[in-house]
């Protein structure tokens, strides 16, 4: 998980940290509320076929400037401006959860500026009969267990290792509050902010990926979005939870690559 | 020192094993635990108690606002406040308060407080809490990332609505209106004194100092921890070049007065337990939505009042522990006087608020507590801070209307 470069790009007054690796057509990866740190395996696998750009969203880790993004409208414009600032021409947009909502909005507003769209475990849908877990109220100590299908797996323990170090715990705790308050800014208290009304404007090939055991984004949400985008495909990764990107990186990456390359 | 009688209006009839069977007294506490007939009794008893406090000489009577919970059944404090304007005559009516971000538009707060001030003859204290996360983010769906910003904008609008003489337009982020022009206006000029209940956030200290408001530290961690926090508060005031007038501060203390220290435990023990074990049984996940407290405050480490850690700390406390740690001040009048003086001095608080109805405490015991406190404790505390002037107290009309007099004096003009 090495060999990626890191640089800053300025989007209006916001300094965005970006990680980049690979060669080939540009792929912009927009992360979600969890599992956004570092350069995980699935991004590495994607970078074998594409030039992968992974920006750190304002409000997360070292990217500041979330105050400049006041509402959903600003959020969408920010991402459009980011694509321009990175000089990307009709990039493939791959979003996970919160990033998937942003990707969906961008592709709805600028249908001709997006090459292809992948929405993984997408946020932004509300179904009374299947709302998904309110992750905002899950106590810190329990949250990890709800993000993957098998919290006991060695794989998972290596990916999101626990720590006994108090300074590290404190730092993670602060990062989590910042990250979730940024997500809250756009999704609180009920995450339906109208994406479903706009996503029929998408004109590019679209793949929706859900995870069979995702407690946060039920498979039904993927169905709803996919039904609204003409010609879209909906795939479900079995034996995987919300963070399938970390739990099943090979399967995830191969679904995406196959879709983008064809 | 001003001494005020605070009512939380708890629901007294939660089942014995409540905290074992339900995750929270707040937000998702089942509605079938509320019996409306009991509610009818409780509201009326509680209003009786507040009115009584006025008649036995408390300087003020206090009420507050909370939602979706059995800890306190006052989601709309302006309703009991209105009842109290008519059936009390001297006490300040301290509404602590209207949780500004929850009133849309905020002009409603400006109007209702103006009405309360006029009806009471100028006895209102206007409280503006930000509101707990349970109330604001979970019960009322307010965005935690935007709550404080919305609160401050609402505050500015209310103040302008009270003081701007001409109609004005307001182009805010959370409220827009073209003709803000409230009728009536508050009786007190330029407006009623403003008190800010807070839980220890640093930004609130700076702001209350800048605005010259009273900061009320409402804490359930006991006065000893309260003293630590207030030391920080007074240090910050000093840093900001603000004087140390104790009337800049308010504090709520649970108090139980009996004939002897031993009898206090007998009489009050189960009700104090009910309060701490049931009324404060808040599910960890509801205690703080992300963004509710600023990163700065989190890093400063001021402990939260509810949530796992707070509950943990109170887990196996005995009566003596509750006393030793300052959660309650309890005992004979002599003990209570001593401890309250010590607490008030340590906190340096000029506006002491006492909680004399605690948890499941029934009417009879509440009245006893109040009588003993008013007659045997209060007179021995009122001399404190006499060298300071209270600039944050209502200034009512001298000759106020007496309810009914406009009809009873026979002059049908």
Image (cartoon, rainbow, N blue to C red):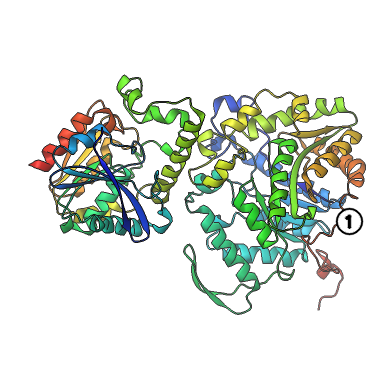
Q: Tell me how many marks there are.
A: 1
Q: Is residue A154 visible?
A: yes
Which residue lies at the image location 86% right of the left edge and 25% below the top edge? B262
Q: Is residue A91 left or right of residue B111?
A: left
Q: Position of residue B308 (x, y in %)?
A: 57, 31
Which residue lies at the image location 63% right of the left edge and 35% below the top edge? B280
Callout 1 secondary element? loop
| Chain of the residue that carries numbered disc 1 in the rendered image | B
Q: Is residue A146 left or right of residue B86?
A: left
Tell me: residue B302, above or below residue B112: above
Nearer-the-camera pick, A250 or B197: A250
Q: Quadrant of residue B301?
A: top right
Q: Quadrant of residue A235?
A: top left
Q: Position of residue B408 (x, y in %)?
A: 85, 67
Where does label 1 land, which residue?
B387
Q: Is residue A167 left or right of residue A121?
A: right
For the residue carrying disc 1, how many other residues have a C-alpha within 10 Å: few (<14), some (14-19), or many (20+)? few
Q: Position of residue B60 (x, y in %)?
A: 79, 53
Q: Is residue B42 left or right of residue B55?
A: left
Q: Position of residue B64 (x, y in %)?
A: 67, 49
User: Split into 4 quadrants, where in the image is the C terminus of chain B?
Assistant: bottom right
Q: Is residue B68 visible?
A: no
Which residue lies at the image location 12% right of the left edge and 45% below the top edge? A24
Nearer-the-camera pick, B160 or B185: B160
Nearer-the-camera pick, A3 or B181: A3
Q: Residue furthest left?
A: A262
Nearer-the-camera pick, A171 or A195: A171
């Amino acid at each position: 998980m090495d060999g990626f470069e890191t640089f800053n790009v300025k989007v209006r007054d916001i300094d965005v940290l970006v990680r980049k690796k690979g060669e080939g057509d540009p792929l912009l990866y927009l992360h979600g509320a969890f599992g956004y740190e570092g350069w995980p395996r699935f991004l590495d696998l994607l970078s074998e076929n594409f030039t992968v750009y992974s920006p750190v969203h304002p409000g997360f880790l070292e990217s500041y400037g979330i105050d400049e993004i006041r509402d959903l409208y600003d959020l969408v414009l920010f991402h459009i401006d980011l694509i321009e600032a990175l000089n990307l021409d009709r990039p493939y947009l791959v979003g996970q959860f919160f990033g998937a909502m942003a990707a969906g909005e961008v592709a709805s507003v600028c249908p001709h500026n997006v090459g292809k769209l992948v929405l993984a475990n997408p946020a932004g849908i509300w179904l009374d009969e299947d709302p998904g877990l309110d992750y905002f109220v899950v106590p810190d100590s329990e949250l990890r267990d709800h993000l993957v299908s098998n919290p006991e797996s060695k794989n998972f323990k290596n990916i999101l290792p626990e720590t006994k170090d108090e300074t590290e715990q404190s730092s993670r705790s602060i990062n989590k509050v910042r990250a979730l308050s940024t997500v809250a800014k756009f999704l609180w208290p009920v995450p339906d902010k109208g994406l479903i009304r706009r996503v029929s404007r998408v004109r590019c090939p679209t793949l929706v990926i859900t995870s069979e055991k995702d407690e946060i984004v039920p498979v039904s949400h993927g169905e709803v979005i996919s039904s609204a985008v003409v010609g879209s495909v909906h795939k479900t990764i079995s034996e995987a939870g919300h963070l399938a990107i970390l739990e099943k990186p090979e399967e995830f990456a191969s679904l995406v690559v196959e879709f983008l390359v064809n | 020192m001003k001494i005020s009688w605070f009512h939380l209006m708890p629901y007294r009839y939660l089942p014995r094993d409540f905290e074992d069977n339900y995750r929270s007294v707040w937000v998702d506490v089942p509605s079938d635990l509320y019996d409306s007939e009991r509610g009818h009794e409780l509201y009326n008893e509680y209003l009786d108690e507040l009115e009584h406090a006025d008649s036995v000489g408390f300087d003020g009577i206090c009420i507050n606002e909370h939602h979706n919970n059995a800890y306190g059944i006052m989601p709309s404090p302006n309703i009991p406040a209105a009842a109290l304007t008519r059936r009390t005559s001297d006490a300040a009516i301290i509404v602590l308060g209207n949780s500004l971000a929850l009133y849309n538009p905020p002009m409603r707060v400006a109007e209702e407080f103006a009405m309360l001030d006029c009806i009471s003859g100028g006895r209102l204290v206007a409280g503006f809490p930000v509101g707990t996360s349970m109330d604001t983010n979970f019960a009322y769906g307010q965005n935690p990332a935007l709550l404080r910003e919305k609160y401050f904008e609402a505050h500015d609008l209310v103040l302008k609505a009270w003081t701007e003489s001409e109609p004005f337009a307001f182009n805010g982020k959370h409220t827009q209106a073209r003709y803000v022009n409230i009728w009536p206006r508050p009786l007190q000029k330029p407006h009623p004194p403003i008190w800010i209940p807070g839980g220890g956030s640093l930004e609130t200290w700076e702001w209350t100092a800048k605005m010259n408001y009273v900061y009320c530290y409402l804490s359930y961690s006991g006065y000893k921890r309260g003293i630590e926090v207030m030391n920080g508060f007074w240090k910050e005031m000093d840093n900001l070049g603000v004087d140390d007038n104790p009337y800049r501060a308010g504090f709520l203390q649970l108090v139980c007065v009996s004939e002897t220290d031993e009898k206090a435990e007998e009489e009050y023990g189960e009700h104090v337990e009910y309060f701490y074990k049931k009324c404060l049984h808040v599910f960890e996940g509801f205690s703080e939505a992300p963004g509710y407290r600023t990163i700065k405050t989190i890093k400063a480490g001021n402990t939260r009042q509810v949530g796992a850690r707070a509950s943990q700390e109170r887990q196996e406390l005995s009566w003596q522990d509750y006393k030793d740690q300052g959660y309650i001040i309890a005992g004979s009048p002599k003990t209570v006087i001593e401890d309250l003086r010590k607490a008030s001095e340590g906190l340096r608080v000029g506006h002491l608020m006492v909680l004399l109805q605690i948890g499941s405490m029934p009417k009879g015991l509440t009245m006893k507590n109040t009588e003993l406190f008013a007659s045997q404790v209060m007179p021995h505390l009122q001399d404190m801070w006499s060298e300071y002037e209270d600039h944050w107290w209502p200034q009512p009309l001298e000759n106020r209307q007496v309810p009914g007099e406009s009809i009873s004096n026979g002059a049908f003009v």
